[in-house]
Image (cartoon, grey):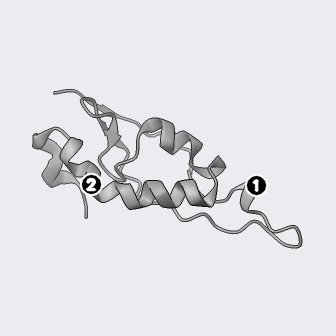
């Protein structure tokens, strides 16, 4: 059982250039991040938001439809976690 804790000091999912209306400021991007950045080494998923590190890194650059697809998948990802961590997921 291996756990990696990461706190990169980066705020993911605040806004996206692709979501910026041409006549105004950027729109906020919905994000599942709850700032509990600990990754289950076995599954590669964050225990706070259940996204992969790749999804976290790309979140603000993904289009709205892709983000919504990922958000819909998140509840089902709990079963991919090491059983020792499943009760730690804040849901």
Could you say which disc has been placed on residue 76 in the image? 2
Can residue 45 be seen at all in this image of the molecule? Answer: yes
Q: How far is mark 1 from mark 2, CA to CA?
A: 29 Å
Q: Residues within 10 Å of mark 2 (few under 14, many from 20)?
A: few
Question: Residue 19: percent from the left, percent from the top?
Answer: 72, 62
Find residue 67 and name its label: none
Give neighbour class at mark 1: few <14, some 14-19, many 20+ (Cα, 10 Å).
few
Residue under label 1: 17
35 left or right, relative to 23: left
| Residue at the image position 23 percent from the left and 54 percent from the top | 89
The reply, left or right, for residue 15 in relation to residue 3 is right
Within the image, what quadrant is residue 52 found in? top left
The residue that appears at 50% across and 61% down in the rendered structure is 68
Image mark count:
2
Looking at the figure, which quarter contains the N terminus? Answer: top left
Q: Is residue 33 visible?
A: no
In the picture, the quarter occupied by the C terminus is bottom left
Q: Which residue sits at x=29%, y=59%?
A: 75
Which x, y percent locates residue 81? 21, 41
């Amino acid at each position: 059982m291996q756990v990696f804790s990461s706190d990169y000091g980066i705020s993911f999912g605040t806004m996206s250039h692709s979501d910026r209306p041409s006549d105004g400021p950027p729109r906020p991007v919905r994000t599942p991040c709850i700032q509990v950045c600990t990754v289950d080494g076995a599954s590669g998923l964050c225990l706070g938001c259940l996204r992969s590190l790749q999804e976290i890194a790309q979140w603000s650059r993904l289009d709205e439809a892709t983000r919504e697809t990922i958000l819909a998948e998140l509840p089902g990802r709990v079963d991919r976690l090491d059983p020792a961590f499943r009760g730690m997921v804040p849901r």
